[in-house]
Image (spheres, rainbow, N blue to C red):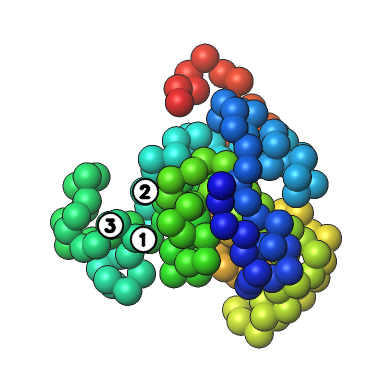
């Protein structure tokens, strides 16, 4: 159904988005597939999109970074002169993860599968480039939260990454997806 990828890291060869179910079942599936606690996945999806695959974000005026199908000024969300770079339940960001498009836009399972392939690559220590850019400490394998922060900031334990980690941990501790106020 979906294309398999060969890059940017070996983990991406396993990305296929081959799962059908409810949003929660998709998040449980991707957690199992990539070896991460399902509640962490639920919390990160809540922070990114409130579990809504139609979410658009990371607005930009740079047309080279526009997600496919969303050029400058073709926007249903009221951001004149801008386009979204990120789409979907986990906000896969086109300029950095273009190999996942267009499937990341159209499939919740694929969007989540792709995002957690990236997390797994980070977690396994495949992103050594993180030690060549602005960072706090030394990047290394096995840091669940550091790799969650990289998804947001593209950097290792920076202030921006720490703020994002805190937001995910807050939604995790509150289990926002299990509260009556959580509307998908």
Q: Determine whether label 3 and label 2 are within 8 Å by CB.
A: yes
Residue at position x 39%, y 43% in the image: 55
Determine the image quadrant of residue 19. Answer: top right
Callouts 1 and 2 close, C-beta under 8 Å: yes
Tell me the residue at 56%/51% (across/down). Answer: 2
For label 2, the SS is strand
Distance between the Cα atoms at labels 3 and 2?
10 Å
**Residue at image point 60% right, 79% down:** 134
Against 91, residue 131 (above or below) is below
Give the percent coordinates (x, y) of residue 39: 70, 34
Q: Mark 1 points at which residue?
A: 67
Query: From the viewer's perspective, is 129 left or right of 52?
Result: right
The earlier-in-sequence mark between 1 and 2 is 2
Asked whether residue 119 is in view, the answer is no
- Give the CA distance from mark 1 to mark 3: 6 Å
Q: Do the residues labelled 1 and 3 touch (CB within 8 Å)?
A: yes
Image vertical order of residue 4 relative to residue 24, above or below: below
Coordinates of residue 95 in the picture (x, y in percent): 44, 69
Which of discs 1 and 2 lies nearer the camera? The answer is 1
* Residue on which disc 3 sits: 70
Judged by depth in the image, the label closer to the viewer, 3 or 2, is 3
Q: Is mark 3 on a helix, strand or loop?
A: loop
Q: Quadrant of residue 3?
A: bottom right
Q: Which residue lies furthest to the bottom in this view?
A: 132
Could you tell which of marks 3 and 2 lies nearer the N-terminus? Answer: 2
In the image, residue 68 lies at what x, y percent?
Answer: 34, 60
Question: Dot 2 corresponds to which residue?
Answer: 56
Distance between mark 1 and mark 2 Cα atoms: 9 Å
Out of 23 and 133, give the one closest to the viewer.
Answer: 23
Q: In this view, does 76 lie above or below 83?
A: above
Quadrant where the image shows the C terminus:
top left
């Amino acid at each position: 159904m979906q294309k398999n990828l060969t890059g940017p890291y070996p983990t991406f060869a396993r990305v296929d988005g081959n799962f059908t179910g409810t949003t929660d079942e998709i998040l449980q599936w991707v957690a199992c597939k990539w070896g991460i606690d399902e509640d962490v996945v639920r919390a990160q999806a809540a922070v990114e999109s409130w579990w809504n695959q139609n979410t658009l974000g990371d607005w930009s005026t740079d047309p080279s970074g526009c997600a496919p199908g969303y050029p400058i000024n073709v926007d249903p969300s009221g951001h004149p002169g801008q386009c979204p770079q990120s789409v979907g339940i986990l906000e896969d960001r086109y300029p950095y993860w273009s190999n996942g498009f267009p499937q990341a836009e159209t499939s919740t399972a694929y969007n989540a599968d792709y995002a957690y392939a990236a997390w797994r690559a980070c977690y396994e220590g495949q992103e050594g480039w993180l030690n060549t850019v602005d960072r706090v400490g030394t990047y290394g394998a096995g840091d669940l939260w550091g790799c969650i922060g990289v998804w947001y900031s593209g950097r290792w334990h920076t202030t921006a990454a720490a703020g994002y980690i805190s937001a995910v941990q807050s939604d995790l501790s509150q289990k926002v997806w299990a509260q009556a106020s959580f509307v998908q």
